[in-house]
Image: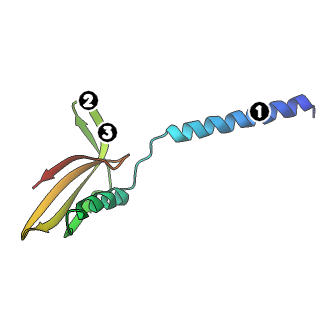
Amino acid sequence: MKTRDLIIGFFTGIAAGVLIREVSTRIETIKPAELVLHDIKQLFKKEGPIDGSWIYMKTEPFNRQAISTDVYRGGISRVRQGEVEQFDFLADARTGTVVELIKI
């Protein structure tokens, strides 16, 4: 094997590795539903205890004006000042950010 072929193979391997790393970091992954629910529950727990919570494990499309993304649908219930409060939420499936919160 010639030294030139070895050098070309070495640099081709490095270039392929860099390309694969760049492509893999640009792919948007979906955050697990359990983790999204856990994060939202932690935010609600700052204001007091939670009675119950739920989340659909499958994403659904969300479109509002210029925003188009996949979201998880879920809910939280708690007792505050002797009354039960219930909230439904939509959370971005990629970041876990709440995009809509409705008090029922």
Instruction: State how far apart marks 1 and 2 are (Cα).
Output: 43 Å
**Residue 17 rendering spot, x and y as whole percentages:** 67, 39
Instruction: State how far apart marks 2 and 3 are (Cα).
Output: 10 Å
Instruction: State how far apart marks 1 and 3 are (Cα).
Output: 39 Å
Secondary structure category for the residue under label 1: helix
Say few, some or many: other residues with alpha carbon within 10 Å of mark 3 (under 14 / 14 to 19 / 20 or more).
some
**Residue 80 rendering spot, x and y as whole percentages:** 11, 67
Residue 66, numbered label: 2
Mark 1 in CB contact with mark 3 (< 8 angstroms): no
**Residue 100 rendering spot, x and y as whole percentages:** 20, 46
The residue wearing badge 3 is 69
Establish if 90 lies above or below 77: above
**Residue 87 rendering spot, x and y as whole percentages:** 16, 57
Count of labels shown?
3
Residue 44, numbered label: none
Q: Earlier in the sequence, mark 1 or mark 3?
A: 1
Q: Earlier in the sequence, mark 1 or mark 2?
A: 1
The residue wearing badge 1 is 11
